[in-house]
Image (tube, helix red, strand yellow):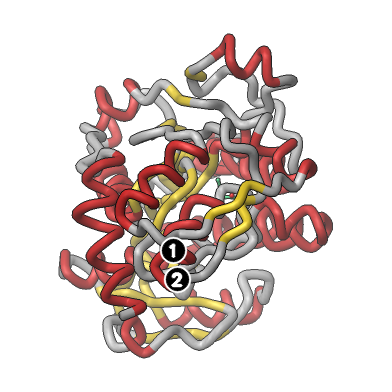
Amino acid sequence: MRRKPVVLVTGANGEVGHGLVFALHKANQYDVLALDLREPDPEIRDLCVATIVGDVLDKHLLDRLVSEYEIHAIFHLAALLSTRAEFTPETAHAVNVEGTLNLLKLAVEQSRWHGETVKFLFPSSIAVYGLPDLTTKTETGRVSENQWTLPTTMYGCNKLYCEQLGRYYSDHYRQLAVEDETHGGVDFRAIRFPGLISAFTVPSGGTSDYVPEMIHAAAKGEAYDCFVREDARITFMAMPDAIKALLDLMAADASKLSGRVYNIGAFNPSAGEFAHLVKQHFPQADINFKPDLKRQGIVDTWPADVYDFRARDDWGFAPEYDLERTMTEYLIPNVTKRYA
Ligand code: AKB
């Protein structure tokens, strides 16, 4: 009995999940199986071969997926983001780490059944970095993948450890087994995403949320109290570039990849610079800076910029949206329409 070949997207109802399901449907290479804690929104539900409401911690549910579907790739997006994770660190560890471990095990089992490698795309984060103080952050400027990986949040620790788990399952799993497993097993590939800005969804639970929150508040005509200082600076990216990066990394020839974890970036305005840009388009925008010193403390440990030449060299990463184009061609027209 042939099972349906699919791509599994966990966290399909989330910010990245929404855009990814649309992009996968448009690419029309795989049927999409969506898994989320909540019933996926109608507009993505209709693009999927099936939508499963469930928890990545539910091993029985995952076993059922193995019996019913032939999974050839997994985009594992389900996670608790950095701010939310600080309020429930043990729950965040369970979801972010044990959930990822469950999906890696599912990938190994699937690979054993259909004999092909299962590509495992994993959204890591700039949260894996931990600059010790603002002076060091300023002096360091850009970081490469092997610098300052000393995260100060549970989310950052989770993401860094899951990178290691993915490398283990891809390159060392069952290394002492007697049988020589010929098929590839798991092909884990991770991107350390910057703050992501979507015109269609408003983030929740992230520490980089101040930029998307600011533009959506301005478009709604609502006052916005920004929880970081005007000089707070980290990397950001328009959601279309994040989705494209996931698909490009998935499509990349494994022989061209120099590693399993990649930085990518697009632009890095300070919060004040972004507010100035928002006011150019929404002159009535009421933006106030009222730093939450604890959340600001997290942002101060994240790098102001990253080196992403490995992603550019290995799999052709090239963001299509700089800050100006993100505002004028992606955000303004879409958020204006959304709140018209
Ligand atoms: C967060 O703020 O937690 C995320 C991230 C930068 O990974 N948006």
* Image height of 263 relative to 43, above or below: above
Q: Determine the residue positioned at 67% across, 22% down.
A: 131
Q: Secondary structure at mark 1?
A: helix
Judge by depth and name the residue closer to the eye, 27 or 147: 147
Q: Is 325 positioned to the left or the right of 195 in the image? A: left
* Kind of residue at badge 1: Ala
What percent of the width, then of the height, locates residue 67?
47, 80
Find out whether the residues at labels 2 and 1 contact each other: C-beta distance under 8 Å.
yes
Pick the quarter of the image with the N terminus: bottom left
What percent of the width, then of the height, locates residue 214?
49, 57
Q: Determine the residue positioned at 50% across, 88% down.
A: 39
Q: Secondary structure at mark 2?
A: loop
Judge by depth and name the residue closer to the eye, 39 or 10: 39
What percent of the width, then of the height, locates residue 169?
55, 43
Judge by depth and name the residue closer to the eye, 164 or 233: 233
What percent of the width, then of the height, locates residue 197?
41, 54
Judge by depth and name the residue closer to the eye, 208 or 50: 208
The answer to whether any part of residue 182 appears in the image is no
* Kind of residue at badge 2: Gly
> Which residue bears the numbered disc 1?
218
Asked if ligand 1 lies within 8 A of label 2, the reply is no
Pick the quarter of the image with the C terminus: bottom left
Residue situated furthest top in the rendering: 139
Question: How far separated are the C-alphas under marks 2 and 1?
Answer: 5 Å
Q: Determine the residue positioned at 33% across, 81% down.
A: 44
> Which residue bears the numbered disc 2?
221
Q: Is 340 positioned to the left or the right of 68 in the image? A: left
* Image height of 212 relative to 260, above or below: below
Residue situated furthest front in the rendering: 284
